[in-house]
Amino acid sequence: MIIRVRQVAATCALGAALTSCAAAPEAPRAARPAPSAPAVSSRPPTLAPGPAGLTPVFKNGPRTHGRTVALTFDADMTADQGPRAAAGERFDNPRLIAALRALKVPATVFMTGRWAEEYPAQARSIGRDPLFEVANHSYSHYAFTGDCYGLPTVSRDLMRADVEHAYAAFRKAGVPDARPYFRFPGGCYDREALKALTPAGVTAVQWDVVSGDAFATDADAVARQVLDGVRPGSVVVMHCTRSAAPTTERAVRTIVPELRAKGYRFVRVSELIGAGGGRH
């Protein structure tokens, strides 16, 4: 389920089964990754715990470290949407992932564990492509607070288990190195949720630019909303769910060249956190 973004409580704001390209084994020199997509670190940067040891929350990178922007995509599927997938509803978006590859755009995909179970080949392909990084969007996509767009809720004593269940689903699908970053379903969190996730050692990642692609029918309007909102260090929230965000691929094909023409460089969330002094 994809949720329209709005303010809730403290802060509330939502892959193609293509194998990654590899150089031929007999080639004398393997092609190096593009400068905008360096190899991911085995120890990604995280933020230090917040006051009282609470899970830290990251919303955007430094505004003064050059024109960088992180496109993030929520691959949503709730724990109870299996019958809808079986009936033919598509919660993936292979053409979007293919477009990001063609445009050579690094990105962070916040994936639910249930999505990885439904599309293991796509999860594995995304997770093994150095252009991308996979982060955690919970297993169930149930809310971590009450009153979050009508989502079912996870009880406080099960929040950490839900996050760890998602990481287990990623490993089972073949994702080798999911990042220690977590995005709350619906963007909804409160102090109790941050406290419950402290033992998980994750950095919560929100955003400062809402794309408006959820349920949108006008790709140009989505693109304009992103282009008008981006500032240096921005984190843009978009979606990788074909049935509920059908215009995202077309919007990205407009957003990317226009931001590059303005001098922006696309990075993953990990690079923004590192630029802001995140710990390795």
Image (cartoon, helix red, strand yellow):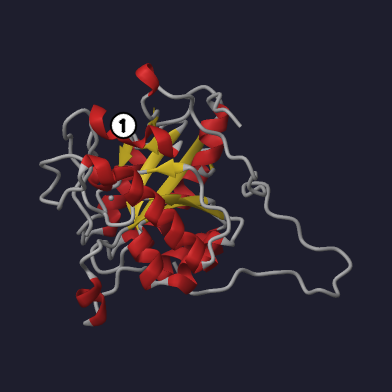
Residue 250 is at least partly visible in this image: no
Query: Is 131 on the left-hand or right-hand side of 186?
Result: right
Query: Label 1's element?
Result: helix
Q: Quadrant of residue 83?
A: bottom left
Residue drawn 67% across the image and 52% down it: 34
Query: Is 278 on the left-hand or right-hand side of 82?
Result: right
Q: Quadrant of residue 6?
A: top left
Relative image position of residue 212 (x, y in whole percent): 24, 49
Residue placed under numbered mark 1 in the picture: 194
- 204 in relation to 221, above or below: above
- 230 in relation to 116, above or below: above
Residue 5 is at least partly visible in this image: yes
Query: Quick one: quadrant of the C terminus?
Result: top right
Relative image position of residue 253 (x, y in whole percent): 43, 59
Relative image position of residue 125 (x, y in whole percent): 54, 68
- 71 in relation to 204, above or below: below
